Image: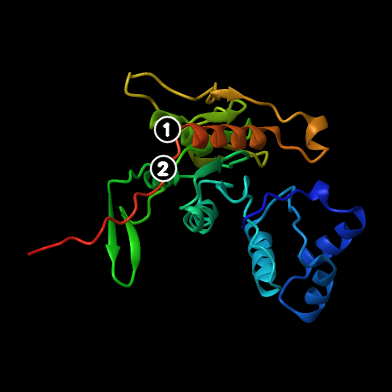
Amino acid sequence: MNHFLSVRDLPRQDVPRLFALIADLKGRQKARDRMTPLAGRTMALIFEKPSLRTRVTFEAGMTQLGGHAIYYTAADGRIGYVHIPNMGGDGLNEFVRQYYPQIRKQGMIIDVRNNGGGFVSEMILERLRRVLAGMGNSRSGGVTTYPSQVFYGPMVCLINHYSASDGDIFPYFFKKYGLGPLIGTRTWGGVVGIRGYSPLVDGGYVTRPEFGTYGLEGQWIIEGHGVDPDIEVDNRDDLVVQGRDPQLEKGIEVVLEEIRKNPKTLPPVPPPALKN
């Protein structure tokens, strides 16, 4: 969990073994044998179409093989990375799985690019909005925070034109709450929810608009335009095919600069109180 990894740094001859390992990673001896030539290496996994099942299987296998758990981290493990694929059950599971193990990182990148939408954005934002208010210490449990699960450091949110529906709403309120800058390209711009499917004789159907979103100023928001980034960065095709991710790179740069300018560390335990 302490390395920023890139597939482009992996020798060409090792790529087939790596992807064969991903396809058959259940902790079996065959998978273990395939991993042997790569032991001790740091490498990157960038899935073109990530899936929860693939990532969990790979991580479980890597753990059994003594390798690194695959979190997309950078800067020698100082920055956490969380990708939320949608705002449904899978997205919420991914948030819990990725966010809490990294909650003591110095910085955090929340990636909602290609987010397919759903209905749990406010649940996730509730967790991200938690503010460190106090500390605690116990004889056997060590140092704790109040609230117990709170991140303390700078955050950024990555967006693109496929961040849609509740994936539009999430970055809008991420910015509204002052959690950090938005980086990438303008989001999809579709937040009018639909309900009901009325069938047509030709086999098609008609839906009706049911849910809309407006702001405290009494004006409709997001629909038809999307959410603009604070820092616009386009993932150009020529850079993507080289294995680059300029939006992520900019996110790393911004978080590292904020860590440098405003470092945040949990306060140490004070000396024991003296009572007469």
- Judge the density around disc 1: few (<14), some (14-19), many (≥20) Cα neighbours within 10 Å: some
Q: Which residue is painted at 33% across and 43% down in the image?
A: 131
In the picture of the structure, the residue carrying the numbered disc 1 is 173
Please say if the residues under marks 2 and 1 sit with CB atoms less than 8 Å apart: yes
- Name the outermost residue toward the right: 13
In the picture of the structure, the residue carrying the numbered disc 2 is 125
Colouring method of the image: rainbow
Percent position (x, y) of residue 108?
Answer: 52, 43
Relative to 20, does residue 31 appear above or below in the rendering? below
Q: With 103 as the anchor, is 74 left or right in this view?
A: right
Q: Which residue is painted at 54% across and 42% down in the image?
A: 110
Q: With 59 as the anchor, is 255 left or right in this view?
A: left
Disc 2 or 1, which lies upstream in sequence?
Answer: 2
Between 205 and 41, the one nearer to me in the picture = 41
Image quarter for residue 184? top right
Between 50 and 151, the one nearer to me in the picture = 151
C-alpha gap between disc 2 and disc 1: 8 Å
Relative to 142, does residue 269 appear above or below in the rendering? above
Percent position (x, y) of residue 226?
Answer: 54, 25
Q: Can I make out residue 45 in this image? A: yes
Q: Can I make out residue 117 in this image? A: no
